[in-house]
Structure formats: C-alpha cells, structure tokens
Image: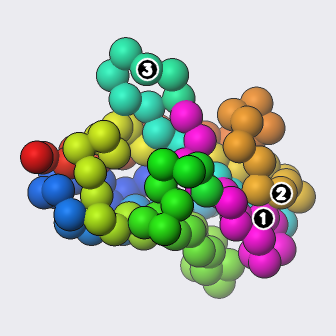
Amino acid sequence: QVQLVESGGGLVQTGGSLRLSCAASGRTVRTYAMGWFRQAPGKEREFVIAISWRGGSTYSADSVKGRFTINRDNAKNTVYLQMNSLKPEDTAVYYCAAAPYGSTWSATEKYGYWGQGTQVTVSS
C-alpha cells in the first residue's frame, strides 16, 4: 500500500507561486507514475500534470502549460508541483496520485492511490 500526503497549499495572490509536495510512505514510489489533479467547488476532478515512473516524461493540461512543472525526488520519496503565475481559476483542492509503472496518464481511473488533498486559493 502507498500512502500519499500533500502539503504546501495556502492562500496566494494572482501572479504568485506555490510549491506543493506529495510525500509517499508505505513503499517507494520510484516505480510509480505520479500525477496531480485538482477539484474546484462544484466541478469534477481534473488532470493537472503527471510524470512517468522513469521520470523522463511529463505531461500537463493546456490550462497550466508553461506555468506548472512537476518533478520527483526518489531519494525522498516525494513529488513536487511548482506552480507559477497563479490565477484565480487555479483555486481548487489539489490531489496527488500514484500509479505503478505508469506513464503520464491524465485519466483519474488510471491511478490507484490518492492523497487527501491540499487547498490552494488564489486571490484576485
């Protein structure tokens, strides 16, 4: 079993930056693809960005392309989401997810492990 815990959320002004962390425990996620998703009030959970288990490939939603990046530190069993140039429409609960030997999948059903989420609020 893999447990995922997100941190780093908070309140930030438009144009600001935040870095979210997803710490894994239970087993190494070295061989897991990792993804970030978000869910705004009244909306469905949507894909943000993902990194393959090998770490060589990333894929992001058009809405965050050029602003958000993902990277992983296998030694720390942690994945990071760097968010720059934040907009009010980025406001949501952000979730980390893991899929064994996965690729840069954008579909929620591909991921078997999820964190509890961390709130990101961008004020205008």
Mark toward the start of the polypeptide (3 vs 2): 3
Q: Where does label 3 land, which residue?
A: 43
Range of the magenta residues? 46-59
Q: Mark 1–mark 3 contact, CB under 8 Å?
A: no
Check disc 3 and report its element: helix, strand or loop: loop
76 vs 32, nearest the viewer: 32
Q: Mark 1–mark 2 contact, CB under 8 Å?
A: yes
Mark toward the start of the polypeptide (1 vs 3): 3
Residue 27 visible in the picture:
no
* 3D distance between C-alphas at marks 3 and 2: 25 Å
Residue type indicated by callout 2? Ser
Residue type indicated by callout 3? Lys
Establish if 91 lies above or below 67. Answer: above
38 vs 84, nearest the viewer: 84
63 to the left or right of 77 = left
Establish if 6 lies above or below 52. Answer: above
Give residue 94's position: percent from left, percent from top. 43, 44
